[in-house]
Image (spheres, rainbow, N blue to C red):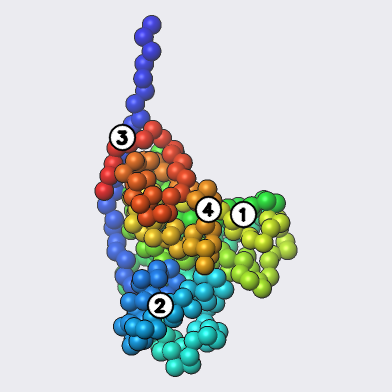
Amino acid sequence: MEARTEIAPAFVEKTPLERYVAPDKPSLVGLTRAQLAKLLDAIGVPETQCKMRVQQLWHWIYFRGFTEFDQMSSLSKELRAKLAQQFTLERPQVMAEQISVDGTRKWLLRLPGEVQGERPHEVECVYIPDTERGTLCVSSQVGCTLTCSFCHTGTQRFVRNLTSDEIVGQVMVARDRLGDWPGGTRPTDSVIPSGDRCVTNIVLMGMGEPLYNLDSVRDALLIVQDGEGIGISRASRSTISTRCAMRCSSYKMARASASPNVASLSPPLAWCQ
């Protein structure tokens, strides 16, 4: 009797229903060094000072986790006031938090930039701790592009892709809630890793198909992995879970030095953007 080869059923790609609208007062959280330099130039910081000021902002935002410009003592009062006038350091808003007996924490996060007449854009982020490491599962889309039958998010409508700053914002929220910044206070009501970090690993296994939002995922991972900031720098500590593991996408990630692990949930499909 001849062996039969089963072919994975085709999936349907959904189109986005809504759009990203930047808030009137944008947050600096989730911006790259190049983006920070561009904004500083736009508000009149001399070109000779931009590199130094970007490095200072990077330290305060991504290493120390500060939420107010007034806390940034290495910046002049004039620059702090100018930054506070035009920008914020806001993260996504925590709308709900669930804490399991095993220490797993799930947050429902509302993203900034609401549009009148549209539903607020919300995603989920989950923290899964054990005694040796803490894994943070983040989302890459509001809803999902695909219609995978084994995934609840696949049954939802696809609203839009997340921006890189919205992906990084989930990491910032988790570190805020876990006291995972220098001098922070850790939770005492559940399991927390025994090392010096609560969040040690990042998994893009939340809402959405990461490789359909490749540019934002790549840029977010570069920020998260930067050793002078959040510092989850080892590629083995960053994993993308995908329904369509693509050689072209992996190549683009490698070219950007953001090479994460790729965990495919199905046979590879040929797709390249």
C-alpha gap between disc 4 and disc 3: 34 Å
Which disc, if any, is residue 43? none
The residue tagged 2 is 51
Vertical relation: 216 (above or below) 151? below
Q: Amino acid at mark 4?
A: Arg
Disc 2 is placed on an element classified as helix
C-alpha gap between disc 1 and disc 4: 14 Å
Say which of marks 4 and 2 sits in front.
2
For the residues labelled 2 and 3, say whether their Cβ atoms are less than 8 Å apart.
no
**Which badge, 1 or 4, comes first in the chain's sequence?**
1
Q: Nearer the viewer, residue 216 or 232?
A: 232
**Which badge, 4 or 3, comes first in the chain's sequence?**
3
The residue tagged 3 is 10
Say which of marks 2 and 3 sits in front.
2
Q: Quadrant of residue 50?
A: bottom left
Q: Quadrant of residue 3?
A: top left
Label 3 crowd (10 A; few <14 / some 14-19 / many >=20): few
C-alpha gap between disc 4 and disc 2: 25 Å
